[in-house]
Amino acid sequence: MKADETATRVEALEALLVEKGIVDPRAVDEVIEHYESNVGPLNGAKVVARAWTDPAYRRRLLADGTRAVAELGFGGPEAQMIIAVENTPTVHNVVVCTLCSCYPWPVLGLPPGWYKSPEYRSRMVAQPRGLLAEMGLELPAAVRIRVWDSSADARYLVVPERPPGTDGLGEADLARLVTRDSMIGVSRALSPGDG
Amino acid sequence: MGGRSEFFGTVAREADEPVFHEPWEGRVFGMSAFVLSLLGRNVDAFRFAQEQLPRRVYLSGYYQRWLAGLEHRLVEAGYLGPGEVDARLAGHPAEAIGRGASPIRREVTSRVLRLLLRPRLPGWLVGRVFPRIFGNARKAPERPRFSEGDRVRVRASRAPGHTRQPGYVSGKPGVVVSHLGSTVFPDAHAVGRRTPPQHLYTVAFEGADLWVDAAEPGTETRVDLYESYLEPL
């Protein structure tokens, strides 16, 4: 189907569902607005920045991601079981969903196009080192790469390493360094002065 | 799709990508959220509907397959007649083929859905209540068969129909690294079959065990797998 044909089909479907009283179009508007404005990687960035600055919170996050994320008021569909996995100098974590496109919506928003692409879904489990390098993240051979294929209920959130030279920064400044891609595991967190 | 070389290629990243590229993508997402709630949140059935699409439709795009999956679920539930959307597009007078929804049910769905649409929610609600509403955790009748550190092998073939057993781990040896409790079994839930909840485990696979000669050194993949997919090793 061409793009405009798809748009016409969606319009026809919605008209039918509204006429039949199956769907409330105002609720549909609000769902769209919510995912465009309220939900996004800034939520996850706050979680990570809190974990970087508060050792007790970090322990709670690694022990029970769902509850720790809920402490900041985030949760809902696609986050019934959040598992936070932490990068270290010797282990790098990266997340994929090879079966569909599972992703922790409440902390990262809706997934970007590349995460849903057949190329990413097929290659990340088979060639993680090569693919990460292609995406701009060259990891030393001594760093073990751990790929999480979110194939069931759990949704994974990567806690990137805190960048050097950030000792004096507070939580809000740190959160600005935590990108969406660093929480999927395809890049590092930014350093002060980057970008 | 894991490990299937027919899909290998460059991963193209788009700078400043919008949440929805076209307004219709948002409408499909929003309608799916509404209809899935109305139909009792069976995400497994929604995924299965997408997996059954012709390959060409499945690969045509993420929201294209959501749209096709949504129509499939609506027909399955009797809310749309087969071909009803096509008939409308062809300009046929709207014969009421499928049924309507009860206004009370629509109103309840609308209210529950809207309850979620806030930037922040109380911690007790998202931490304790939501996982029970949205989550699939259920008590399994049996004790877990495996525990951390157990060596296991994934059964050689996948069950027909919907399954959460990725093809690339089938027949492969791995180690249980955690027990994630027990949940509704998606393979059965997708077709509305009642079976007991199953224990779910995270299993770690060495790159060399999965990809043999093509494996990159120092890599592993962790996959969440249901108990019936696993055999002791």
Image (cartoon, coloured by chain):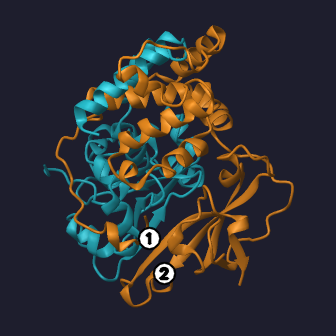
Q: Chain of mark 1?
A: A
Subunit that carries the residue with mark 2:
B
Specify the farthest residue to the bottom. Answer: B213
Q: Which residue is mark 1?
A: A146
Relative to B203, say whether B90 is above or below: above
Return the residue nearer the eye: B84 or A11: B84
Residue type at mark 2 is Leu
Please rate how many residues cluster around mark 2, counting C-alpha atoms within 10 Å: few if below 14, some from 14 to 19, many from 20.
many
Give the secondary structure at mark 1. Answer: strand
Query: Which of the labelled discs sits on residue A34, or is there none?
Result: none
* Closer mark to the observer between disc 1 and disc 2: 2
Q: Amino acid at mark 1?
A: Arg
Specify the chain shown as cyan.
Answer: A
Query: At x 36% / y 23%, what residue is drawn?
Result: B89
Q: Are marks 1 and 2 on the same chain?
A: no
Q: Give above or below for B179 relative to A79.
A: below
Picture layout, residue A136 above or below residue A63:
below
A8 left or right of B115 in image? left
Give the quadrant of residue B86: top left
Q: Residues within 10 Å of mark 1 (few under 14, many from 20)?
A: many
Tell whether B6 sits left or right of A153.
Answer: left
Quarter of the picture containing the N terminus of chain A is top left
Q: Residue A79 location in percent, x, y? A: 53, 42
* Residue that mark 2 sits on: B210
> Which residue: 29% across, 53% down?
A114
Who's the residue at 56% across and 48% down the image? Answer: B48
Hue used for the chain lettered B: orange
What residue lies at 54% left-to-right and 22% top-to-bottom? B113
